[in-house]
Structure formats: structure tokens, C-alpha cells
Image (cartoon, rainbow, N blue to C red):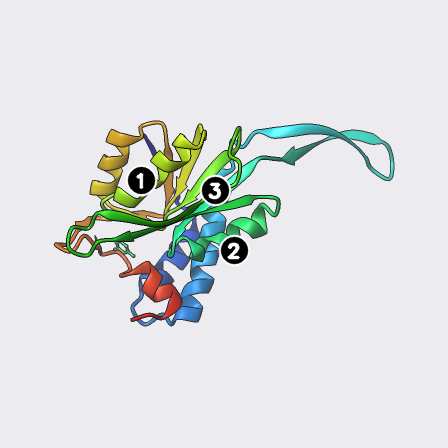
């Protein structure tokens, strides 16, 4: 498994806004969007392009077009990254992976799953908090069993347990993140982290 932790001043700025407990949900959503632009920029560096011939006002020339990209938002926190992905890749198709964490066991429980046709698509799984890795590993299993082969996970914060889990379960998946944090606490929250991403996005405290 390949982990890339992006190192860009804007990503650091937005990550700090996300980490700050005084950040209100509306600011939090804007910062999640701002940070996701940097993650998408990194994730699309090696995206395959279709070569096309176009006509400029002057003459014909060769152009390039992005095609077959699918974003899969892991509900509900992944929704905080989706708008930025769609802004940058408007033709992107979208799937949803509904999974919630059992607060007793910290294991993923599926409650909704819907995907567009994946065939040869480049798949970006939006899973902001890679804590134990259970939800992301589950989501990757599901998209693989639907035929996906080129999978990248976009995360805001990762932790050693989650990275280890992905390394064991899905060594072929590239993880792109804004941070690799110290550890999980006894409730499987990332430390220092940013708290519960879904609650902070949607104000459900
Ligand atoms: N999910 C979150 O939203 N935050 C964490 O720290 C871990 C999992």
C-alpha cells in the first residue's frame, strides 16, 4: 500500500481549521472543501486521459479529456469532500457507501450501498477519517467486488492502525491524506485528530 501525505501550505492551513475545536460547522465545511481540492489534485496526477482532436479558433490540435472517474462517498463524513471532487471533475459519477461504526466494537455495519457502473473507472473513495481502517477496507472490498481495479482513497487524517489495516487488506490501494496522526484513543478516535468528522460537518453534537 502506498501512502502519500500531501505537504502544501493550503492543505496545512485548512487542516488546522478542521482540527480547531472552535471552528463552526459552516467554516468546517468550507475548510473540508478547500482541503479536498489539494487531495484531488494529488490523486489525479496519474489519471489516464483520452486523447481527442479539437478545433481552436486557429487550427486543429490535440487535446485531452478526463473520463471514467467514480467517487464513492463513505457516509456520512465523505459527503464533506464530495462537492470539491465534483467541482474539479464535473463528469465524475458518484456512489455511496453507507456504513456506521458500532460504538461498542468499532466495527463497520453496512446500511446503504449504491454504485454506478465501475468497469474501467478510476475510483476515488472518500473516507476522511482513516482510524481503524474497518470502514475503508469494507468499502474497498465492495467496490472491488463490483469490478473496480484502480482505487485511490482520499483521507483527511490517517492513523497508524488504519494504515496497517490497509497495508494488510489492500496493498494495491493508494491512500492520499493530509495527515498521519499519532494514535487512536480507547474509543478508536484519532489523536490529535479533529473529533467526529460527521458531527462537525453537520453540527450534530
Ligand atoms: N471517525 C471520526 O469522525 N473521527 C475519528 O477520530 C475517527 C473516526
Element marked by disc 3: loop
Lateral position of residue 49 relative to residue 1, left or right: right
Asked whether the viewer can see residue 5, the reply is no
Alpha-carbon neighbours of circle 1 within 10 Å: few (<14), some, or many (≥20)? some
Tag shown at residue 83: 2
Q: Earlier in the sequence, mark 2 or mark 1?
A: 2
Q: Which residue is mark 3?
A: 115
Residue at 19% across, 50% down? 106
Compared with 91, 53 (above or below) is: above
Q: Residue 155's x, y, as percent?
A: 37, 46
Q: Earlier in the sequence, mark 3 or mark 1?
A: 3
Please name whichever residue, 202 or 144, is drawn nearer the observer in this view of the structure.
144
Residue at 19% across, 57% down? 103
Alpha-carbon neighbours of circle 2 within 10 Å: few (<14), some, or many (≥20)? some
Please name whichever residue, 58 or 176, is drawn nearer the observer in this view of the structure.
176
Q: Earlier in the sequence, mark 3 or mark 2?
A: 2
Residue at 42% across, 52% down? 11
Measured in 3D between alpha carbons, the distance from the residue under mark 2 to the one under mark 1, in whole angstroms, is 23 Å
Lateral position of residue 38 relative to residue 110, left or right: right
Mark 2 or 1: the one toward you = 1
Q: Residue 5's x, y, as percent?
A: 35, 42
| Quadrant in the picture for residue 20 | bottom left
Please name whichever residue, 134 or 99, is drawn nearer the observer in this view of the structure.
99
Amino acid at each position: 500500500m502506498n501512502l502519500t501525505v500531501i505537504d502544501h501550505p493550503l492543505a496545512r492551513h485548512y487542516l488546522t481549521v478542521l482540527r480547531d475545536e472552535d471552528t463552526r460547522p459552516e467554516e468546517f465545511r468550507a475548510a473540508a472543501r478547500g482541503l479536498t481540492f489539494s487531495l484531488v489534485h494529488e490523486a489525479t496526477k496519474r489519471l489516464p486521459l483520452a486523447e481527442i482532436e479539437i478545433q481552436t479558433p486557429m487550427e486543429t490540435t490535440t487535446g485531452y479529456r478526463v473520463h471514467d472517474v467514480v467517487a464513492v462517498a463513505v457516509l456520512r463524513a465523505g459527503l464533506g469532500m464530495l462537492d470539491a471532487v465534483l467541482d474539479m471533475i464535473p463528469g465524475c459519477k458518484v456512489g455511496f457507501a453507507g456504513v456506521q461504526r458500532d460504538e461498542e466494537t468499532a466495527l463497520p455495519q453496512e446500511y446503504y450501498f449504491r454504485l454506478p457502473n465501475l468497469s474501467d473507472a478510476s475510483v476515488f473513495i472518500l473516507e476522511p477519517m482513516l482510524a481503524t481502517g474497518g470502514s475503508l477496507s469494507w468499502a474497498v472490498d465492495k467496490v472491488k467486488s463490483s469490478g473496480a481495479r484502480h482505487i485511490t482513497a482520499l483521507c483527511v487524517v490517517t492513523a497508524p492502525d488504519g494504515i496497517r489495516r490497509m497495508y494488510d487488506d489492500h496493498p494495491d490501494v493508494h491512500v492520499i491524506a493530509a495527515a498521519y496522526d499519532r494514535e487512536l484513543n480507547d474509543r478508536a478516535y484519532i489523536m490529535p485528530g479533529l473529533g467526529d468528522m460527521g458531527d462537525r460537518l453537520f453540527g450534530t453534537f
